[in-house]
């Protein structure tokens, strides 16, 4: 692990603001950056490569697998390049956030530390450890802003979040306005420090790079998925403006093959390369310039689903990870390793499930339709503890997000926000959504299907 050597920083200024880019690798509509700018002190931008990202889960797999690791590496490279274009210089360090930040605060004469705050118990533990390590001369600002709706604008306290999505949606649609996204200013007062170890060298020698590895994307992947704000904004442009796909989103969103049946914004949203408010404002622009219809509304509707799971994770904390979920339900699901492994390898014999799992294993992505089916199948047909599936997704997904992943898993395993039974008939689903078998042929080629 790289150790942050204080003497390597050759120039420091007193009264600076430390801006920690946590999982929000962008400059556009970045509430923590805007807060740092308000402080009117030179800003020291930092990314911390945390070795705990690669700790093994109970399944013996790293929490972050190769798909997300590469996406994060590319996102950090893109952020560093953008900051350079704006006249600054990103510090990249490897180590535990509390140690790296404590050292940086002392070295740079930091009086203010600003970062975004996220749901998730590990994320909250990190924030607690940081508070206990940083000197009392340094103030913290944990800025809330990775959701479409700001928590301060909600018409209820988080503890009173409705149990089911529809009442939540109806209430916020009626009573909450989305805040306009804020573009990054062209001039930012960055600190003038220079570090003798350039960010590129730290990144290249890091565990993140090792885990990202060197591999060629599967040609069957729905998209090549390059990390970073630049690629994320290009995807918005392609989906909305060049391809004009938004106008039919509601009809195509249950698709399984190809780049454009759904937006594929999730990796950039989950990893903070694009803000949900920027997507919202592009939808509004599209509605004004092209067409406003059920499809354009439906993309916002899905962003509200995303918000619902984020607020739910904040509200429910650790119970999100309990076997009985937020309902505290008694469930009959076992941690059966053999059944789990067959599922994970795409070897259950249920061809629709197997095709989806093979897509995930080869690309790090799976459609929403696929995710619902494989989750329901593992927990309800195979009777396996749903948390093994959620944990496997945590490793594999390029768009992993703690709230969306564990919330959706619980939901589809009938221990989440929906009190109804969520068991899917996977053969019927295959007939409905893959009537010609093209999807299954794509992913099961070479097998008996
Ligand atoms: C078991 C399971 C696990 C999931 N894990 C994740 C995860 O870790 N990260 C993640 O971002 N999404 C997760 N989802 C939600 C959803 O499957 C993906 O967001 C979606 O497939 C991404 O493709 P897209 O960007 O083309 O979505 P689109 O259909 O184009 O939707 C636009 C955006 O809305 C949001 N969204 C859509 N559906 C959901 C949903 N059900 N829950 C939350 N947000 C939603 C996403 O941010 C998505 O990018 C999971 C769903 C299931 C059933």
Image (cartoon, rainbow, N blue to C red):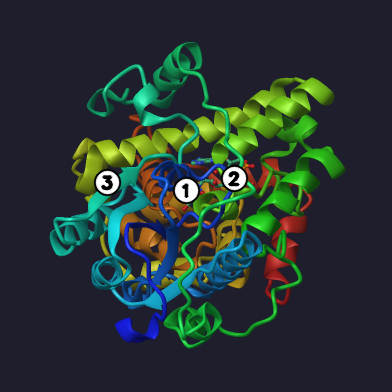
**Label 1 belongs to which residue?**
33
x%, y% of residue 241? 82, 39
Measure the alpha-carbon separation of dots 1 and 3. Answer: 30 Å
Instruction: State yes or no: discs 2 and 3 in contact (Cβ < 8 Å).
Output: no
N-term-proximal mark, 2 vs 3:
2
Is 371 or 91 nearer to us in this picture? 91
Residue labelled 2 has its Cβ within 8 Å of some atom of ligand 1: no
Looking at the rendering, in which quadrant would you find the C terminus? Answer: bottom right
Residue depicted at x 13% and y 60%: 132
x%, y% of residue 343? 46, 66
Residue 10 is drawn in which quadrant?
bottom left
Is 110 or 143 nearer to us in this picture? 110
Q: Quadrant of ligand 1?
A: top right
Residue depicted at x 34% and y 33%: 417
Tag 1 secondary structure: helix
Asked if residue 137 is positioned above or below residue 56 in the image, the reply reads above
x%, y% of residue 191? 46, 63
Asked if residue 262 is positioned above or below residue 195 in the image, the reply reads above
Q: Seen in the image, is 20 located left or right of residue 373?
A: left
N-term-proximal mark, 1 vs 3:
1
**Label 3 belongs to which residue?**
320
Visible residue check, residue 339: yes
Is 337 or 8 nearer to us in this picture? 8
Q: Using the image, tell me which numbered label, if any, was put on residue 184.
A: 2
Instruction: State yes or no: discs 2 and 1 in contact (Cβ < 8 Å).
Output: yes
Tag 3 secondary structure: helix
Asked if residue 152 is positioned above or below residue 340 in the image, the reply reads above
């Amino acid at each position: 692990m790289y150790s942050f050597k204080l003497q390597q920083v050759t120039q420091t200024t007193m009264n600076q603001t430390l801006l920690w880019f946590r999982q929000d690798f962008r400059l556009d509509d970045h509430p923590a950056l805007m807060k740092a700018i308000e402080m009117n002190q030179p800003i020291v931008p930092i990314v911390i490569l945390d070795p705990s990202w690669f700790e093994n889960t109970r399944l013996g797999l790293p929490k972050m697998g190769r798909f997300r690791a590469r996406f994060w590496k590319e996102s950090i490279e893109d952020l560093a390049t953008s900051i350079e274009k704006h006249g600054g210089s990103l510090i990249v360090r490897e180590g535990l956030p509390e140690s790296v930040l404590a050292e940086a605060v002392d070295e740079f004469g930091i009086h203010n530390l600003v970062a975004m705050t996220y749901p998730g118990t590990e994320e909250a533990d990190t924030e607690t450890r940081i508070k206990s390590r940083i000197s009392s001369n340094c103030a913290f600002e944990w800025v809330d802003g990775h959701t479409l709706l700001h928590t301060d604008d909600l018409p209820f306290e988080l503890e009173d979040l409705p149990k089911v999505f529809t009442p939540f949606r109806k209430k916020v649609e009626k009573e909450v306005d989305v805040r306009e996204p804020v573009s990054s200013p062209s001039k930012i007062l960055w600190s003038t420090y220079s570090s003798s170890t350039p960010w590129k060298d730290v990144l290249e020698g890091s565990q993140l790079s090792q885990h990202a590895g060197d591999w060629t994307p599967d040609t069957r992947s729905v998209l090549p998925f390059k990390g970073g704000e630049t690629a994320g904004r290009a995807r918005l442009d392609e989906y909305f403006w060049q391809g004009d796909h938004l106008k039919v989103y509601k009809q195509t969103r249950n698709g399984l093959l190809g780049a454009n049946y759904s937006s594929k914004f999730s990796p950039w949203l989950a990893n903070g390369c694009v803000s949900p408010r920027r997507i919202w404002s592009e939808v509004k622009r599209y509605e004004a310039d092209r067409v406003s219809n059920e499809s354009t509304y439906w993309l916002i509707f899905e962003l509200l689903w995303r918000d619902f799971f984020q607020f739910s994770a904040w509200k429910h904390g650790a119970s999100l990870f309990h076997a009985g979920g937020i309902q505290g339900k008694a469930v009959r699901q076992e941690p059966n390793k053999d059944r789990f492994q067959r599922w994970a390898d795409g070897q259950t014999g249920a061809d629709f499930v197997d095709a989806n799992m093979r897509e995930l294993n080869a690309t790090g992505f799976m459609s929403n339709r696929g995710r619902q089916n494989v989750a329901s199948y593992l927990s309800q047909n195979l009777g396996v503890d749903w948390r093994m599936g959620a944990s496997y997704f945590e490793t594999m997904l390029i768009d992993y997000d703690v709230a969306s992943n564990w919330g959706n898993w619980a939901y589809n395993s009938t221990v989440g926000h929906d009190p109804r039974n969520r068991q899917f008939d996977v053969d019927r689903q295959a007939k409905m959504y893959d009537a010609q078998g093209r999807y299954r042929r794509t992913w099961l080629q070479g097998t008996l299907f």
